[in-house]
Amino acid sequence: MDKIVIHGGPRLRGEIRVLGAKNAALPTQCAALLADGPTTLRHLPQLSDVRTMNRLLTGLGCEVAGERTLTIDPTGVGAGSLEAPYDLVKTMRASVTVMGPLLARYGRARVSLPGGCAIGARPIDQHLRGLEALGAEVTLKHGYVETRAPGPEHRLKGARFKFDLVTVGGTQNVMMAATLARGSTRLENVAREPEVVELALVLNKMGARIRGAGTPVIEIEGVDSLSGIDHAILPDRIEAGTFMVAAAITRGDVVLKDAPVDHMHSVIETLESAGVVCQPVPDGLRVIGPEELAPIHVTTLPHPGFPTDMQAQMTVLAVMAKGRSTVTETIFENRFMHVPELCRLGADIRVNGNTAEVFGATPLSGTTVMATDLRASASLVIAGLVADGVTEVRRVYHLDRGYETIEKRLRPLGARIERVHGAKS
C-alpha cells in the first residue's frame, strides 16, 4: 500500500494545469450507454474511479479503448445480465448511475445497493422514486436493485417528479432515464451543480431535448434514439479549489491553468475574505497567499453554495488563519473525519454537532496520519505542506480516486513530496 510523504515548509510557486473533472467524467461515461454508436471523451483524468467505471462498462458489454482520450462503444450491450455487481459498486458509489441509462435503453437493470460510506449513509431512494415516477418497476432483492421498464415495449413514460432533497446523482440518473422516455418529463428541486449542466450538454449533443439544467427545474422531451459524440470533459473545480488552498496556506503564488472560474465563485469569495488574492488571468486564475490569513466562516450548501467537497480543504485554511473560524457541514452527517487527524498535526478544532470551531493560527508538526475518504486525504496532504518536519499520509488509495498523481504535479511548484510504495496501512 502506498503512502505520501511531505516535508513541509516551501512556498508554492509556478503554474499547474487543472485536469478534467471526475464528477463530470463518471456520469458522462455512463451516458455513453444511451447512444447507438461509439462516444469519444477527451481530457479524462487518470483516476482509479474512471478506471473502475471503465471496468463496469466493459462488463456490461461495451468496448472501451484509450486513457486520456477514451472511446466507449456500447453496441455489444444488451445480451448479458445488465448488472452492476457489488464488487465494483462497493468501491465507487457512482456506479449506480448506470441504472438510468440501462433502464432507458435496454428496459432493465440490476445494480448492487451501494450501502453506507465513510462520510454518511447517502441512500439512493430519490433515484428509485424518480425512476418509479417514469413507470419503472423497482424490486429490492438480495442486496440488489432490479428495475424494469413497463409494457411490451419496455419503455419509460414521461412524468412530473419533485425530488424531496437536492441530489446530484439522483438528478443525473433520472435525467438520463428520461431522455428516451415517451413524452415529456419535468424534474423539480433538481441539483444545479456544473456537473449536472455538463451532463445535460453532453446529452443534448447526443440528440436529447433537455432544458433548464442549472436551474431548479429541468424539462426533458423524450426522443427515440441518441447518437455517439466527441466531447471534452470540463476542468475539475474541486481539484482547482484544492490547489488554491494549497497556494494560499503556503503563502504561495500559483497560476492554475484552465481553472473553471465561473463555477467557483463561492470558493473564490471565501478565499478572498481570508485575504487571498484571486486574480483571473488568460486561461486561468492566479492565487497569491497573504503573509497572514484572516478567519473564515463557511457553511456547505448545494450549488451555487459552498461545495461540501471543499469543506475539508477549507478547514485546513481555517487552521492556518489567525483567530476563530467556523465550518458548518449541512450536506453529509459524518464529514469531519479529517478533524482528529488534523488535530494529530497540532490543529485546535472543536466539533459541536455539524459545526467545527477552528482556532488558529496553529503551528502544525508533521506526524503520521490516516486518510478516511477522498477529500479528507487531500486536506491532510495540503496540511503537510505547512507542517514542520515530515508528514506521512497513509491509505492514499482514497486520494487516487480524485487526484491524478498529486505528488508529481505539486513538485514543480516547489513542494517536497513523494509517494512511497509498499507502505503499511
Image (cartoon, helix red, strand yellow):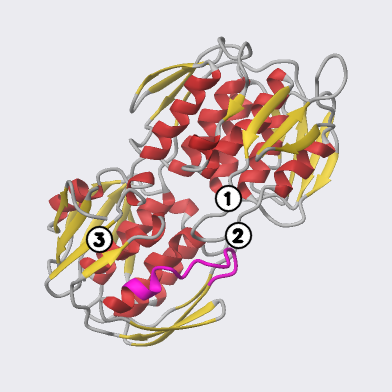
**Number of marks:** 3
Residue at x-position 59% and y-position 41%: 197
Would you place residue 342 above or below residue 370 in this image? below
Judge whether residue 331 is colored magenta: yes
Residue 119: % across, % down:
51, 61
Residues in magenta, as a range: 329-341
Residue 413: % across, % down:
16, 55
Relative placement, left or right, of 415 versus 39 is left
> Do the numbered discs 1 and 2 sit on residues whose CB atoms are within 8 Å?
yes
Amino acid residing under circle 1:
Glu
Amino acid residing under circle 3:
Val
User: Of residues 92 and 239, which is closer to you in this image?
Assistant: 92
Q: Which mark is residue 386?
A: none
> Which residue has dot 3 on it?
393
Amino acid residing under circle 2:
Pro
> Which residue has dot 1 on it?
193
Q: Which mark is in front, 3 or 1?
A: 3
